[in-house]
Image (tube, rainbow, N blue to C red):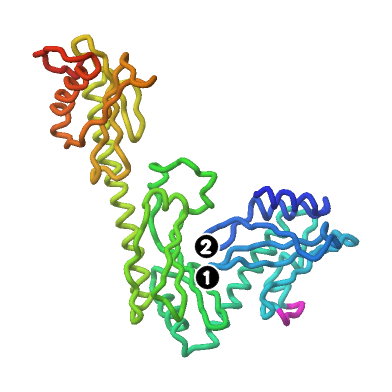
Amino acid sequence: MSSDSFGILYDIATSFRPYIQNVLQELKLGLCKTKVDLEKIPGGPDGADTQFRLVLPYCSKKLKWEVIFDSSTPWFAPDFRFDDESFLNNVDEGFLEEKLGSLAEWDENDPEALSKVISELVSLYRAHHIKKLNEDESSRAYFEYTALLGDALTSEKDIEVWVGGHVVEFLIKLNVDVSRLPELYNEGTEENPGIDTALLLVRYPNSTNAELILSPLLTKSLGNIVLPLMHQSGVLMDYVPMVTELLNNKIQDVLKNDKLKRELLAQLIVRYEGAILEHDANSAAFLFETDDFHWILHIEVGENFPDNLPILTLRSVYHMDKGKPKSKVLPPCLYKDLEENIANQVEIFKNECKGPQTSNQLVNLDN
């Protein structure tokens, strides 16, 4: 919950706070599962303790729906004011009982009461826009939507639809396998907005400007993804599987490279077990001695390994340079040349630290 939302929450009457707090902390809406935000309703302090605005994610939009409680009857369900005047502008009691059961049977003792109503309203909002789309069966967007639903990989629940005056938006969930990625990237889970998903945002009539929306986990693991060009004559039922395959192949590459990285570090740890200082999933440090010269080898294996070779750094245990241990980053080299390269570079580094000395002894990394 943001600090602004926290402040607004405590301006609300105490009897209504549990509903709002549950919405802000627990409710995650839309395919991206982004949390709901809270705003004040501008126009003066009157009713500030019973009225507020919820900011809800939908497609690329931020829906702003006003929620209005009545302080004289706090056990009653709230009223709503929507930013789309065509939404629920003419409904009867039977519709509310059938489609909005949580509102018709409002439970004042349930902290989740408002969250349940909002979830049902968002589902109705989505159905409202699908209905608007279906009213123009001759449009390109209608054709693309119905054709995409004919693909066994994409169902109606995987698409959010928004229909504006001259623009139609589709937010499409891509069927990517992220099940093994948390093994690699388990940091910052608090910032990850729930389900790890890849979404494709497409607008008509200008469908060539498709946008890829990745959750933080996928952004961290896959980096920058360049989408293939979607030609004006192309269709979503071909383009969506193409982008899905691109992402799944990228995920497999990441997992394959991580396996190679772990194997390399494991080989080094086993090879120099007696010299190991520390290690993690991306690096290792070893302490060696050569002719009374004590030095540390630090190996950093980046996320782009093996495309990028490991970074090798030598560090003296005793010699200082401007208040820090004297160190040297070695030129990159292949694993098969690793030991010979380190042996040569250590002799040079030792002489740089201790001054020129004559030595015919070879470096022994096993010591």
Instruction: Name the residue at the left extreme.
Output: 360
Amino acid of disc 2: Leu
x, y percent for residue 86? 67, 80
Badge 1 local density, few (<14 within 10 Å), some, or many (20+)? many
x, y percent for residue 284? 31, 28
Indicate the secondary structure of the residue bearing disc 2. Answer: loop
**Residues in magenta?**
89-94
Q: Foreground residue, 330 or 296?
A: 330
Relative placement, left or right, of 45 versus 362 is right
State the residue position of label 2.
31
Tally of numbered discs: 2
- Residue 275 visible here: no
* Pointer 2 with pointer 1, Cβ within 8 A: yes
**Residue 277 sits in which quadrant?**
top left
Q: Main secondary structure of the magenta part?
A: loop
- Residue 259 visible here: yes
State the residue position of label 1.
160
Residue displayed at 12% across by 17% down? 362
Q: Is residue 78 above or below residue 231?
A: above
Q: Quadrant of the C terminus?
A: top left
Instruction: Name the residue at the right extreme.
Output: 72
Amino acid of disc 1: Glu
Mark 1 or mark 2, which is nearer the start of the sequence?
Answer: 2
Q: CA distance from mark 2 to mark 1?
A: 8 Å
Residue displayed at 73% across by 82% down? 90
Q: Is residue 34 above or below residue 153?
A: above
x, y percent for residue 52? 75, 61
